[in-house]
Every structure is written in C-alpha cells, then in structure tokens.
Amino acid sequence: MEISVDPGSRAAEIYKSNRALERYYCNFGLNPAYQEQLKEAGLTISGTDPAGEARIMELPAHPFFFGTLFVPQANSSRNNPHPIVVEFLRAAGQSSKLQEFGTKSLEENHLSIGSNQISFVGHKG
C-alpha cells in the first residue's frame, strides 16, 4: 500500500521521503468519528493511504509516540531493518529512563543492526 507522508513530519524524517510503501494485513483503522478529537488533543495524522485514511500517527511533543496501522517489523530484518524500527531504538537509547534503569553501570553499549550503529550511553556509578 502506498502511504502519503506529510512533509516536515517525524514520519517524513524517518522515511527521508514523502512517500512510503508498506504492507497492511487487517481491516482495522482509525474511526473517523474520533479523528478530529484526537487532532485537538495533539495527535497528528502524518501518513494516509490513497483513500485518505490514517495510517501513521504521531504525537510531536513526545520523544517517540509513533503509531502505524501497518506492521513495520514485518519488513525488517537484522541486515535490513525498517527505518521506523531503527528510529524507535535510537529514541529508546536517548531516553533518560533507559539510561537510568538499563545502562546505569555501563559507560556505553552499542547495538548494530545492519549498517545502523546505535549507541546507548549510560551513567557510571
């Protein structure tokens, strides 16, 4: 399925494009009756399918609140990770909660996925 991605959105940054091709396996979607209410609460619909239905949503004020109505990990492998998966891991590595709980006694961890190198910098002591 072709997805139109809003220019300037986090999705556009992740895909490095205003267009994405994704597989969609189910009949679920965002109920249009709630779409305006969600927008008023700060949720941005940043990707739509050819029928104009929401496929990517994000909360711009959050470090990584990013939802899809497709399964990015289905198109991901260790040697060719999906860009959303890579960005999620990068955001998690920058999270103060992860640094506080997950890497407290380590100076630095590295995670390599394909050609992407992600560093998780922790606190000593």
Image (cartoon, grey):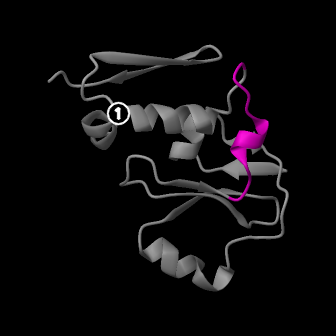
The residue that disc 1 covers is 94
Q: Position of residue 114 (x, y in %)?
A: 65, 16
- Residue beneath the point at 24% across and 24% down: 105
Among the 4 quarters of the image, the one containing residue 14: top right
Residue 28, percent across and down?
77, 70
Nearest the eye: 17 or 82: 82
Q: Is residue 55 visible?
A: yes
Looking at the rendered structure, the secondary structure element under dot 1 is helix
Q: Quadrant of residue 120?
A: top left
- Which residue is nearer to you in this view: 65 or 10? 65
Asked if 112 appears above or below 103 in the picture, the reply is above
Find the residue positioned furthest to the left. Answer: 125
**Residue range highlighted in magenta:** 69-79
Q: Is residue 112 left or right of residue 78?
A: left
Judged left or right of residue 125, residue 80 is right
In front of the other: 7 or 42: 42
The crowd level at tag 1 (other Cα within 10 Å; few <14, some 14-19, many 20+) is some
Residue 106 sits in which quadrant?
top left
